[in-house]
Image: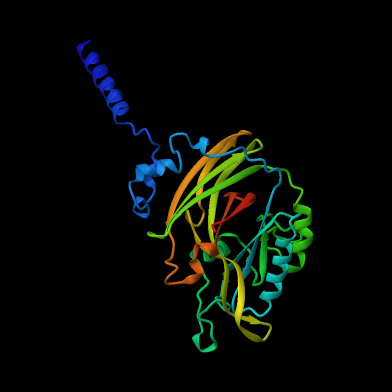
Amino acid sequence: MKKNICILIILLIGLIGCDKTENPIPPVFGDLNWSLYPGDSNNYLALYSFEDPSSNWSTNMNTKTHILLEDYTGHKCGSCPAAAEDALLLENDSSLGVIVISIHACDVDAFQYIDSAMGFITDFTTTAGDVYIVDMPGFPANPIGTINRKPNPLDPENDVWFPQSSWSSFINQEQNSDLLANIQLQSNYFPSTNGLFVHVESEFKSNLSGDYNLIIYLVRERVIASQMVGTTIEPNYHHHSVLSDNVNGIWGTPISSGNISTGTKFYNDYSIELTDPNTDSTYDINNLSLIAYICERNTFEVIQVTKLELN
C-alpha cells in the first residue's frame, strides 16, 4: 500500500512539475531563428500573437480554387521561352486564377549548366527542383509543366506532366474545381538581418482524408540573365517568377494526416535568412514573393495555392 502511495505521489509531482514549466508560448515560437530578429524576441509579439494565432487573421473570403502552374524550364532550352510566354498569358488572365512558378530542372542537366564562355553565368537550379523531377515519376523533357499536379488524363501512366500545348485547355477545365482549402500569408522583413518571418493560416473547406503538406516557395519575380531563344542567345532575357528557395523544406511541413473536417485550421510560422541584396540585387525585397500551397503528399495533388508579394 505504501509503495502504491509513493508511486502516486511521484506521478503527481511529475504532473505538477510539467505544469509549472510549461511554456505559455507554443513551441514553434522557440523554433524560429530569433537571431534574424533585430531586438528582443518577446517584442515580436506586438507584430504577431503566438498565444492566440487565430487573432492575427481576418476571415478568408476567398471562394476560388487557384491553379499552380509549374513551368519546368532551362536557360539553355531554346523552346522554353515560348512556353514561358504561354504561362504568363494564363497568369495574366485573372479569371483563371493561375499562379506561375518557373522551376529550372531537368534530368540530364543539358539545359541548366553554367557556361561562362556563352554568357550563361546564373545558376537557376534548386535542390527542390532537382528532387521533384525524380520524385514525381515520368519527367519527359523541358519545357513541361504541372497543373495543380493533377494526373494528365492523356498520359498512359497518368503522370502529372503536361506539355505546353495542353496547358490552356486543362487549366480551363480545372478553374471550376471545388474549393477544398484556403491559405493566408503574412510576413515581416528585417533588412538589418535579411531576416524574413512568415506566418501561414491553412483552412480546410471540405471533409478530406490523406496526408497533406504545406510547402512555401521563395520566388524572385524577375531575373535578367542569358536565355537561349530558339537558336539565339538573348543576354538580357527577363526570367519570370523564378523558384529560388523553399522556405520550409523540399516537401514542406506535414499539417494533417488521416481524416480532416471542414473548418479545421492550422497555423505555421517560419523564418529564413534571405540572400543579401547588396550581394545579389535580385533578392531585393521588392523583387520577392512567396507562393504557398497545400498538396497531398502521396498523390502530389495541389488542392490550393496562394501568392504574397513582399514589396
Residue 302 position, x and y percent, is 63, 51
Identify the image quadrant of residue 63: top right
The image's colour scheme reads rainbow
Total tally of numbered discs in the picture: 0
Residue 117 relative to residue 87: left or right = left
Residue 281 position, x and y percent, is 48, 71
- With respect to residue 63, does 87 lie above or below? below
**Which quarter of the rendered picture does the C terminus lie within?**
bottom right
Residue positioned most to the top = 1
Q: Foreground: 250 or 22?
A: 22
Residue 98 relative to residue 276: left or right = right
Residue 306 relative to residue 28: left or right = right
- With respect to residue 210, does 148 lie above or below? below
Residue 261 position, x and y percent, is 61, 33
Identify the image quadrant of residue 146: bottom right
Q: Measuring 41% from the left and 41% from the top, which residue is drawn there?
A: 45
Residue 197 position, x and y percent, is 45, 51
Q: Measuring 73% from the left and 65% from the top, which residue is drawn there?
A: 89
Q: Foreground: 248 or 291?
A: 291
Residue positioned most to the bottom = 117
Q: Measuring 68% from the left and 43% from the top, which residue is drawn there?
A: 62
Residue positioned most to the left = 2
- With respect to residue 171, does 265 lie above or below? above
**Which quarter of the rendered picture does the N terminus lie within?**
top left
Q: Measuring 49% from the left and 37% from the top, which residue is drawn there?
A: 53
Q: Foreground: 97 or 115?
A: 97
